[in-house]
């Protein structure tokens, strides 16, 4: 991944968040009850980069819709972009992605 800085600042802040999958079995900890708080904390700290793990497509869609000023790089781990994401959101006021690619740590790094 190559970035081109469009701002003069040199300080970066990074947040890592295990989103945890969206399952009704979580009862009191299910995504519907957590998602507003997750976005609130992300907006409050406004990090330069946010790494997310275990985010399912519907969770990624919620984050994209609610994190204005961010875009992400990453794909789901299953064919067709489905499955859990390990994605990187970045502040679009500070960075512009010039190129990006995905590979897997496996015997077939170019295949999902």
Image (tube, grey):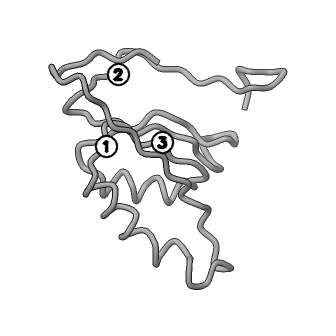
**Which is more N-terminal, label 2 or label 3?**
3
Q: Residue 40 sits in which quadrant?
A: bottom left
In the rendered structure, find residue 47 and report the number of the disc placed on it: 1
Q: Is residue 42 left or right of residue 15?
A: left
In which image quadrant can residue 81 be found?
top right
Question: Which residue position is annotated with label 3?
Answer: 51
Q: Secondary structure at mark 1?
A: loop
Q: Nearer the viewer, residue 61 or 38?
A: 38
In the rendered structure, are the residues bearing label 3 and label 1 in contact, judged by CB atoms less than 8 Å apart? no
Residue 65 location in percent, x, y?
Answer: 32, 55
Q: Quadrant of the C terminus?
A: top right
Q: Secondary structure at mark 2?
A: strand
Residue 97 got which mark? 2
Please give the name of the residue rendered at 47% of the width and 18% of the height, measured from the top-left corner: 1
Q: CA distance from mark 3 to mark 2?
A: 16 Å
**Dots 1 and 2: beta carbons under 8 Å?**
no
Mark 1, Cα crowd under 10 Å, few <14 / some 14-19 / many 20+, is: some
């Amino acid at each position: 991944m190559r970035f081109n800085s469009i701002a003069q600042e040199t300080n970066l802040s990074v947040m890592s968040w295990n989103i945890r999958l969206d399952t009704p079995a979580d009862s009191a900890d299910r995504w519907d009850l957590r998602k507003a708080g997750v976005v609130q904390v992300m907006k409050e700290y406004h990090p330069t980069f946010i790494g997310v793990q275990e985010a399912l497509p519907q969770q990624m869609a919620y984050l994209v819709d609610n994190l204005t000023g961010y875009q992400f790089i990453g794909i789901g781990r299953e064919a067709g972009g489905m499955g859990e994401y390990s994605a990187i959101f970045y502040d679009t006021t500070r960075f512009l992605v010039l190129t990006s690619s995905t590979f897997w740590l496996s015997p077939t790094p170019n295949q999902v």
